[in-house]
Image (cartoon, helix red, strand yellow):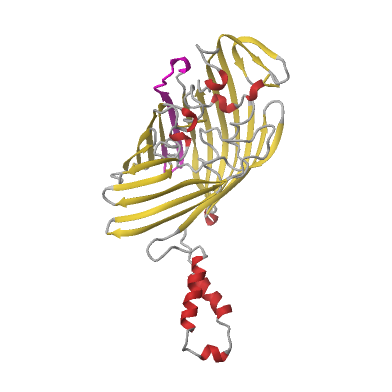
Amino acid sequence: MKKYSVSAAVVAGLLAGGLSIGSAQAADLGGNCCADLEERVAELEATTVRKGNRKVSLTISGWVAEQVMWWDDGVESNTYVTGLGTTLSSHFKLTGAAQIAPGWSAGYVIHIEAGTADPLASLNQDTDEGNSTVRTHQSYWFLKSETLGKLSVGLMSPPSDNAAILVDGSGSLVPANWVLFDNQAFFVNINGQRVAGGRNWGDYAHCQSWGTGGLGGAGDCGAFAGPANVVRYDSPTFGGFSVSASWGEDDMWDVAGRYAGELGGFKLAVAAAYFSQNDTSNTAGGDTGSNWQIGAYVEHMPTGLFAYGAYGADLDTPNPNFDLGADRWYVKAGIRQRWTSLGHTVLYGEYGIKNDSVDCGVLGCAPGGPVTGSELKQWGLGIVQEIDAAAMSLWVSYRRFDLSEDCSPACSISLENGGTIPAATHHEFDGMHVVKAGALINF
């Protein structure tokens, strides 16, 4: 992350162009020559990205990330060139700050996401391009005290957003986490046939099973599954500990606690968060309810051996007809070592389960419908190579997804081709394989 200034470029351009005038005029130091120069500099500075004004700085940072993804759903296989999905997409961020007084500062963040083909939201067997958008991901201002903490207002990530994920310090967070980035929008097959009604993998990776999307999906639960318009407070860090809380309109609130430090040759990081939303009409998807999550990471620094785990559960479902008691957990372990001069190499294995995370609005749940539970399992292996000289990571990974559904009484499943899977109390759907090879470069 660097501060970029065009002052030198402006001066060089003026010397090369605007000041290449006749010798007689150049020798004339009187008149309005200096006024003209100042006017031209001001004009160029007004139309050029620079490091900020004399009081407030500007820093440009971000990353570009793309990948090649091969998939096989048991019926069809194909290879797509994709982005990484919303929140991991290529983006740039403008940040800045100004000192108000000793220990006090004010600043801002504008975060723009430039997503390409999105495997999280739009890609499936019928769509290899989709949801290539530019959107405002965050936009807020803040006041910060070194002793009292930081207050922020605007569009931003509340503390519970991805709280359990962000403690993962292995270097493999991007290609391997518990959110269903790879195949959420892919349609589900059973016995080699596509299920009717557009049923997809994301329908079994939902947050708050009775809802319609407002509390997120695929493991990223709470805080609308992303940035929201909130007022947020972050405490200073004391001995590695910090707390955060936020409130958003009509009405949601959350709180999170974090710890990061080193102890006896081990690197430790832990985060836990609670999220609550209690309005049914003015929120994304109209959901209400609450959930909590916790994530922990430990690494033995001399050997590079690491382990990471996360757990989350839905709480306070207001409609007992759709209360399946959904929860989800995920573990990952491996080694992070510097075996080459390029940078660290990360080898890992992962495994996770999403229990009863059914979208009842789509599938119907007991007692209002037949579905009483589900299990979505994922496991995988991968390698990440960091290239320090380019602030870059490259990865290759394999993942396997399996899905089952329980019904009471026995239920049948309609197929897209007009057929029907006979009624049963348990259905096993076709599994899905995904291989990804990609890279992320920071700037």
Please give the name of the residue rendered at 27% of the width and 59% of the height, measured from the top-left corner. Answer: 102
Q: Nearer the viewer, residue 314 or 52?
A: 52
Question: At which x and y percent is residue 55?
Answer: 37, 63
Looking at the rendered structure, the number of numbered marks drawn on it comes to: 0
Outermost residue on the right side: it is: 417
Question: At which x and y percent is residue 390?
Answer: 55, 55
Question: At which x and y percent is residue 70?
Answer: 67, 36
Task: Look at the image and give the residue range highlighted in magenta.
Answer: 297-323
Above or below for 192 versus 272 = above
Please give the name of the residue rendered at 46% of the width and 34% of the height, measured from the top-left corner. Answer: 224
Above or below for 116 versus 96 = above
In this image, 244 relative to 380: left or right? left
In this image, 247 relative to 373: left or right? left
User: Residue 81 appears in which quarter of the rendering?
Assistant: top right
Is residue 205 in the magenta section? no
Residue 430 visible, this orientation: no
Outermost residue on the top side: it is: 409
Above or below for 201 versus 150 = above
Question: At which x and y percent is residue 108?
Answer: 41, 53
User: Residue 14 appears in which quarter of the rendering?
Assistant: bottom right
Residue 357 visible, this orientation: yes
Is residue 302 in the magenta section? yes
Please give the name of the residue rendered at 42% of the width and 64% of the height, measured from the top-left corner. Answer: 53
In this image, 133 relative to 357: left or right? right
